[in-house]
Image (tube, helix red, strand yellow):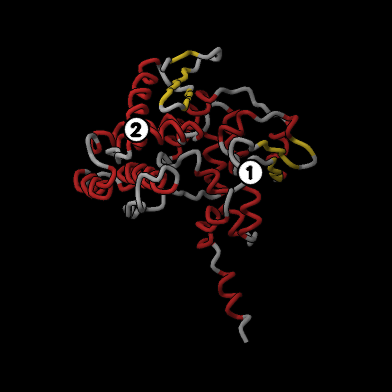
Amino acid sequence: MPITKRPNGHYQVTIGYGGRTYRKTSRHWSFKDAKDYERKWLASVKDAASGREPQRLIEHAIERWLIDHVPRLQSEAKTKAHVRALMPYVEGRKLSEITQVWAEVKAAEVGKAPATVNHKGRILRQVSRMAWREWEWLERPAAITLLPEKPRETFLTTAQVEALAMACPNPAVGDYVRLAAYTGIRRGHLLRLTAHEVRGGFIHLDRTSKTKTLQLVPLHPKVAGIAARLPLGVSDDQVRDSWANARAACGLQHVRWHDLRHTCASWLVQAGVPLHTVSEVLGHSSMAMTRRYAHLAPEHLAEAIKRLA
């Protein structure tokens, strides 16, 4: 039952039991991680072979979830930080107690922002669903009801966007502010764009990391000249620093960079653009993500009711 290190540097655990061979590899393991996994895996294989039902703990489910699911997320580092905050609540607790653990988390963290508490609830809910649907460790998923959260989106006016852009100490960052507001493109994608992606009045945005498609983002005349000069020669750190200074100068410290994307959506909806078109422009993977902006233009509901005979 050796633990080997493959040529790519990843550790592989090999277990032979009952005439069968089992292998598991992870790029996230240290040798100690692989050794711990080998021990737990062998115990579960022996339990299954003898017909004994293994004792499933929440921490075991979280460990498997971290290996099987979390590495695919763009927010892997943040998710692992939320897991570390959750671990004191789940150590030694059975998987069948996951609903009770969630109740204890909410009771212990009264006074904290609902969004902060809900990070733990979402982890428990996802682990429970995978334990039920994929691993067959539970007969049914746990009932996890998240705390109600206040919407965090902030919608800016064109004047506010221009004020923020003008207040950036680095003019190139100001141009990125304008480009973000008029295209809805996320900061990470913006900073990777070059003029080669700008053709025929569109930005050809490669979104293989999100929706595995090529997204066409139309360019507003106000930012077409900026797009033609991409990249603008600033680093992510320079963008962060200049953006922080601009928010402070404009008294808009509560505004996040991602709110520029929300602002783009709000402008489109208030201009009467159909939600399905807004979804295409922003590259949403589902209409559910776009419907949160529907309240900004309720006129279509009134028009719909007028069509009744």
**Res 106 seen here:** yes
Image height check: is 248 above or below 143?
A: above
Which percent across, then down, holds residue 58?
30, 39
Which percent across, then down, holds residue 246?
48, 34
Quick one: 89 or 138, which is closer to the camera? 138
Choose mark 1 or mark 2, whichever is in front.
Answer: 2
Q: Residue at x 72, y 38 (%)?
A: 204
**Local secondary structure at mark 2:** helix
Image height check: is 131 above or below 230?
A: below
The crowd level at tag 1 (other Cα within 10 Å; few <14, some 14-19, many 20+) is: many
**Res 111 seen here:** no
**Local secondary structure at mark 1:** helix
The C terminus - image quarter: bottom right
Image height check: is 59 above or below 131?
A: above
Q: Residue at x 41, y 39 (%)?
A: 253
Q: Which mark is residue 277?
A: none
Kind of residue sitting beneath label 2: Ser
First in sequence: mark 1 or mark 2? 2
Which percent across, then down, holds residue 8?
55, 15
Residue tagged 1: 183
- 103 to the left or right of 30: left
Quick one: 25 or 212, which is closer to the camera? 25
Kind of residue sitting beneath label 1: Thr
Whether the residues at callouts 1 and 2 have beta carbons within 8 Å, the answer is no
Identity of the residue furthest to the bottom in this view? 309
Q: Residue at x 71, y 43 (%)?
A: 216
Q: Residue at x 34, y 34 (%)?
A: 83
Which percent across, then down, holds residue 196?
75, 30
Residue tagged 2: 44
